[in-house]
Amino acid sequence: MAIVETERDGAILVIRMNRPERLNALGAELRAALAQAWCAFRDSRDLEVAIFTGTGRAFCAGEDMKESLERGSVPGDSGNAPASIAGSASARPRLDNPYDEGTLAKPVITAINGYAMGGGFQLAERGDLRVAVRGAIFEMSEAKRWLLGGFAHGLTAAMPHAIATEMAFAYRFSAERLCELGWLNRLTEPDELIPTAKEMAAHLMTLPPASRVNTLAMMHSLRPQPSEEIERLAAALRGHGALDDLMESRRAFAEKRAPNFRGWDDPADRDRTPTLDSIRST
């Protein structure tokens, strides 16, 4: 049984995460298999649209906490990892994954079959079109696991500031609410999920090929992104605090207990939080 299953239907490729016993958590093997599948999709001259989904009751539960604890470090290739960790000897080499890098020139429909948490939410978010089963639960978990919450989710989704703040602080959202907010394109019953995604893909295939490619390029260009200045502030904030709290959050999760966070190595650091003004002055 493959950890990532692929199924071709003409020019449409279904990519399915198949680790249901771990809620499709993103361990090293799954990450590598996904990278391989996305590269194959990118490089194929016969495949034009992808449908991305999962097996079981979760689309993807995000980071594999068990692997992180066994390794003794947080994933070094995470966009939210402090630079001191991302550049460490324990960091995994970055995989060539055009889906994660946002470089695919072909549309992807995310078909969200259940929980989409943390890194799993990010996988769902990267899709160009999104359909989810009713009752699916979403969480942008960075605030629980890192030293900076998921500040960019609401921006890239063009959400009102209060909703973006709710996302950043790792509140949970139902599929129904995200559909009301415009984040999802369709809601379905479980047995209608893939058929609905395939109907959406079939529509894309009725378009002139150049129109499909050019329109996707334009929509990617229009998607809001944090400015370079904001990214510099985020980089500073990701390392502002006790780095051991990163592992403590994962230990507490694995041990099913409340975390004992330290906060800051030097308590005075609480009053030295980086700001845009401090970033501009450096």
Image (cartoon, rainbow, N blue to C red):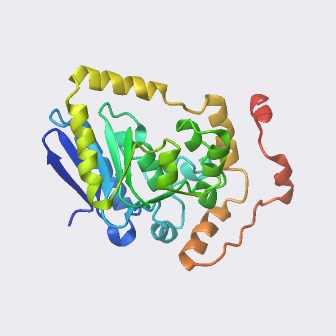
Tell me if 119 is positioned left or right of 161 in this view.
left
Q: Position of residue 212 (x, y in %)?
A: 28, 26
Residue 31 visible to the viewer = yes
When asked about the image quadrant of residue 275, the answer is top right
Q: Is residue 277 above or below residue 237?
A: above
Q: Residue furthest left?
A: 10
Q: Along the line of sight, which residue is nearer the eye, 76 or 175?
A: 175
Identified at 41% across, 36% down, the residue is: 102
- Residue 253 drawn at (x, y percent): 57, 72
Residue at 51% x, 55% y is: 89
In-image side of 252 versus 129 (left or right): right
* Residue 99, percent from left and from top: 36, 41
In the depicted structure, whether residue 73 falls above or below residue 53: below
Q: Give the camera-side residue of 105 and 269.
A: 105
| Percent of width and height locating residue 152 | 58, 41
Residue, x 24% and y 42% (percent of image)? 199
Classify 226 as above or below 30: above
Left or right: where 62 falls relative to 17: right
Quadrant holding the C terminus = top right
- 19 above or below 15? below
Q: Along the line of sight, which residue is nearer the eye, 75 or 134? A: 134
On the picture, is 253 further left or further right than 2?
Answer: right
Pick the quarter of the image with the N terminus: bottom left
Mark count: 0
